[in-house]
């Protein structure tokens, strides 16, 4: 059975020593002192470690089942969900006007990592609801907000997003679900949606579906799409629940992973729906939820890797196999622990250095969201829009790699389901696919985000990295191990961007053929930047006589590993980008 311990010390270090949140000037951050954040995250850790993590393996083994039209979740999920509801965890960073606690997104993100690491499938029920709440907040009428938000914030009702159809995944312009206007101002929704996470369950008394459908007069493609609120159970004018709506679960998908989450085929048979946002502007409204979901999925990428890494590191310390090549490390035993072998240490450091860098990157991204939404910072909004596909694509690709590497440390025992390592691999895999497959994230980054606002966000990122290097290059310890590698990697990123600017207009295939390499190149530079910032904080802490010098020394050693062994991958990605489209496009389709 796998275990999980929340990384509270690392979260505290990033929030207060690296990001220095109380001094940031972002509205609401002045209240985020160490005492408050430590209290919140310690309580989240207690819930995650004692309640959610013990349900992870049993929930995976049992899965969800459809009984007489009702979806049943695994044993223990309902009681755990009641604890999440009673603790107000879902409303941590939602508006007080609707029953939330009104804290910044940063705190919701930090707590969210803990919950995902403990039990990804379980956390999806509230995670999807969070995105649905944000979409109704942004686009709903006052009546819709009053009707739905208090109960959704409280988790009495949950939410979903309904996009995909059997014939239409990424290309949403092909959807066939229809919305017919009704005399009373409602809409009759008819069609089928697939892959609907948390589409139905027995954890809450209502499920509020956000459904994309085509209404008359909208034209072809995505221009004709509108977004509708379609409750599982209709809501009476006084807020009480009324009749069951004309929708049903066709089946629960049999999936590779996240078995504890009900992924449903949803059938709408003239179900009553309410227009959310403007008619024929559904994609604009849905992307509010999609963008939040993509950041949540980025977090899933490294959060599952964190849980897998913890179990791999523990196994490597305990499992006796072979002798160290430099001499017996455990002469009294029959063999030495795995941790003495260089290749095992490499495998573990690949994981550790990625996860800690990804955590800092994600939390920094959350500060940009808060700066944009709480402080009206347009530059922060442009930057997080640029970085969203990098966060989602890079962190989930590398997070899955880390889960596989953690399983590898266990050898054959990692391949045995009862030991739990295989579940981390299976669960992590979906994050690369849903909320926009990672290839689509790369295309979005190169095709849209680089040129957004005339290129101002990406130029601002380059200048941010350059400024950090200039301001700190007098620090000898920081320069050699961190700033010099970061400078080289940043130059590779700039060279790749210039290559696209020069070659893209002449050969769009050349730009798109290199898009995934560019996304990964960008991701490495972002993590290199985070490691340089963490190293600066660690060096300062050691100089000031920090109470836990071992933690800070380990932080520096881990960071140096990333800069020396991982960051040089930017040169490889640049070389692939410069190879152009010919190696990718030359082979005839029939030769595949």
Image (cartoon, rainbow, N blue to C red):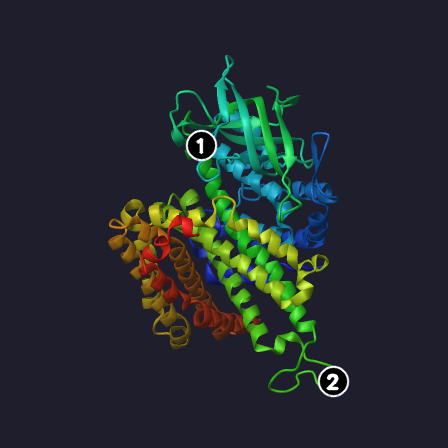
Residue 404 point in image, percent of width and height: 58, 61
Q: Is residue 38 left or right of residue 584?
A: right
Residue in the foreground of this view, choosing between 150 and 490: 490
Tell me the crowding category of disc 2: few under 14, some 14 to 19, or many 20 or more residues within 10 angstroms, Cα based: few
Q: Quadrant of residue 496?
A: bottom left
Can see residue 169? Answer: yes
Q: Is residue 160 above or below residue 501?
A: above
Residue count near mark 1 (Cα–Cα under 10 Å), binned few <14, some 14–19, many ≥20: some
Residue drawn at (61%, 65%) of the image: 408
Residue 359 screen position, x and y as percent: 51, 58
| Rendered view: 446 above or below 1 | above
Q: Is residue 500 left or right of residue 127?
A: left
User: Could you tell me which residue is drawn at 64 percent across and 43 percent down?
Assistant: 254
Whether pointer 2 and pointer 1 mark residues with C-beta atoms closer than 8 Å, the reply is: no
* Vertical order, 404 against 211 (above or below): below
Which residue, given by chain and number where applicable, does mark 2 sit on?
332
């Amino acid at each position: 059975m796998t275990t999980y311990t929340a990384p509270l010390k690392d979260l505290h270090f990033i929030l207060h020593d690296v990001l220095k949140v109380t001094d940031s000037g972002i509205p609401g951050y002045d209240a985020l002192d160490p005492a408050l954040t430590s209290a919140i995250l310690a309580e989240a850790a207690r819930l995650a470690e004692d309640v959610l993590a013990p349900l992870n393996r049993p929930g995976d083994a049992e899965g969800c089942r459809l009984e007489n039209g009702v979806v049943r979740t695994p044993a223990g999920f309902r009681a755990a969900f009641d604890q999440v509801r009673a603790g107000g965890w879902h409303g941590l960073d939602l508006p007080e006007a609707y029953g939330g606690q009104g804290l910044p997104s940063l705190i919701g993100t930090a707590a969210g990592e803990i919950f995902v690491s403990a039990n990804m499938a379980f956390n999806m029920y509230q995670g999807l609801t969070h995105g649905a709440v944000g979409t109704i907040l942004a686009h709903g009428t006052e009546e819709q907000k009053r009707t739905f938000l208090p109960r959704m914030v409280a988790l009495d009702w949950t939410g979903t997003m309904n996009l995909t159809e059997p014939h239409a995944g990424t290309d949403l312009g092909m959807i066939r679900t229809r919305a017919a206007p009704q005399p009373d101002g409602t809409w009759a929704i008819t069609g089928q949606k697939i892959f609907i996470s948390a589409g139905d369950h027995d954890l809450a008394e209502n499920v509020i579906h956000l459904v994309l459908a085509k209404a008359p007069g909208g034209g072809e493609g995505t221009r004709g799409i509108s977004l509708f609120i379609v409750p599982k159970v209709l809501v009476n004018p006084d807020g009480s629940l009324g009749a069951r709506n004309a929708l049903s679960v066709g089946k629960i998908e049999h999936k590779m992973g996240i078995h504890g989450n009900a992924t449903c085929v949803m059938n709408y048979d003239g179900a009553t729906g309410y227009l959310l946002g403007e008619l024929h502007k559904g994609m604009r409204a849905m992307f509010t939820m999609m963008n939040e979901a993509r950041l949540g999925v980025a977090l899933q990428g490294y959060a599952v890797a964190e849980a897998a890494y913890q179990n791999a590191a523990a196994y490597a310390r305990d499992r006796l196999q072979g002798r160290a090549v430099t001499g017996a490390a455990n002469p009294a035993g029959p063999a030495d622990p795995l941790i003495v072998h260089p290749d095992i240490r490499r495998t573990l450091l690949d994981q550790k250095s990625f996860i800690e860098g990804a955590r800092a990157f994600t939390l920094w991204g959350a500060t940009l969201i808060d700066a944009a939404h709480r402080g009206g910072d347009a530059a922060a909004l442009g930057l997080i829009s640029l970085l969203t596909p990098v966060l989602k694509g890079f962190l989930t690709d590398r997070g899955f790699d880390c889960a596989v590497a953690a399983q590898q440390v266990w050898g054959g025992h990692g391949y045995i389901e009862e030991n739990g390592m295989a579940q981390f691999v299976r669960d992590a895999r979906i994050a690369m696919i849903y909320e926009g497959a990672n290839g689509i994230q790369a295309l979005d980054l190169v095709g849209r985000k680089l040129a957004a606002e005339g290129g101002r966000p990406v130029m601002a990122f380059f200048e941010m990295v350059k400024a950090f290097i200039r301001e700190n290059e007098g620090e000898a310890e920081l320069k050699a191990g961190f700033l010099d590698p970061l400078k080289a990697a940043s130059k590779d990123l700039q060279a790749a961007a210039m290559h696209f600017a020069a070659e893209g207009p002449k050969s769009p295939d050349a730009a798109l053929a290199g898009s995934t390499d560019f996304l990964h190149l960008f991701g490495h530079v972002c993590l290199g930047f985070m490691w340089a910032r963490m190293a600066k904080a660690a060096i300062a802490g050691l100089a000031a006589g920090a109470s836990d010098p071992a933690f800070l020394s380990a932080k520096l050693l881990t960071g140096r590993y990333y800069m020396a062994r991982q960051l040089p991958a930017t040169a490889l990605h640049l070389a692939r980008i410069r190879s152009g489209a010919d190696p990718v496009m030359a082979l005839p389709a029939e030769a595949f």
